[in-house]
Amino acid sequence: MECLNDGCPKTHEEDIMDIPLDDPEANKAAAKIQASFRGHMTRKKMKEDKPREEKRREQK
């Protein structure tokens, strides 16, 4: 169903296209988001590995 009047909200694709890719502030913000996500994934992985290491210590 298409909206043919001007009062329709923008689609997600149109919102993405509005972001200027050469904006230094947008690049800084993207780098911060990516870094925090990488940190989150690393901490999550380390948390999963921790019980394995404890089991190894108990067996020795």
Image (spheres, rainbow, N blue to C red):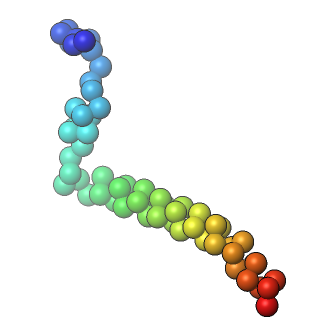
Q: Is residue 6 above or below residue 36?
A: above
Which residue lies most toward the top here? Answer: 5
Relative to residue 42, is residue 22 drawn left or right? left
Q: Residue at x 25, y 12 (%)?
A: 1
Q: Residue at x 52, y 63 (%)?
A: 41
Q: Is residue 31 above or below residue 14?
A: below
Relative to residue 35, is residue 40 drawn left or right? right
Q: Name the spot of residue 21 as percent of width and height, x first.
A: 20, 51
Q: Name the spot of residue 53 as percent of width and height, x first.
A: 70, 79
Q: Is residue 40 above or below residue 59?
A: above
Which residue lies most toward the right here? Answer: 58
Q: Residue at x 27, y 24 (%)?
A: 10
Quadrant showing the C terminus: bottom right
Tell me, yes or no, if residue 43 can be seen here: no
Dividing the picture into quadrants, the one containing residue 2 is: top left
Tell me, yes or no, if residue 48 can be seen here: yes
Give the number of callouts: 0
Q: Name the spot of residue 46 as percent of width and height, x first.
A: 61, 71
Q: Residue at x 57, y 67 (%)?
A: 45
Q: Looking at this view, is 11 or 46 the one in front?
A: 46
Q: Looking at this view, is 26 or 12 the one in front?
A: 12
Q: Name the spot of residue 39 as percent of width and height, x first.
A: 51, 66
Dividing the picture into quadrants, the one containing residue 16 is: top left
Q: Looking at this view, is 46 or 18 the one in front?
A: 46
Which residue lies most toward the bottom here? Answer: 60
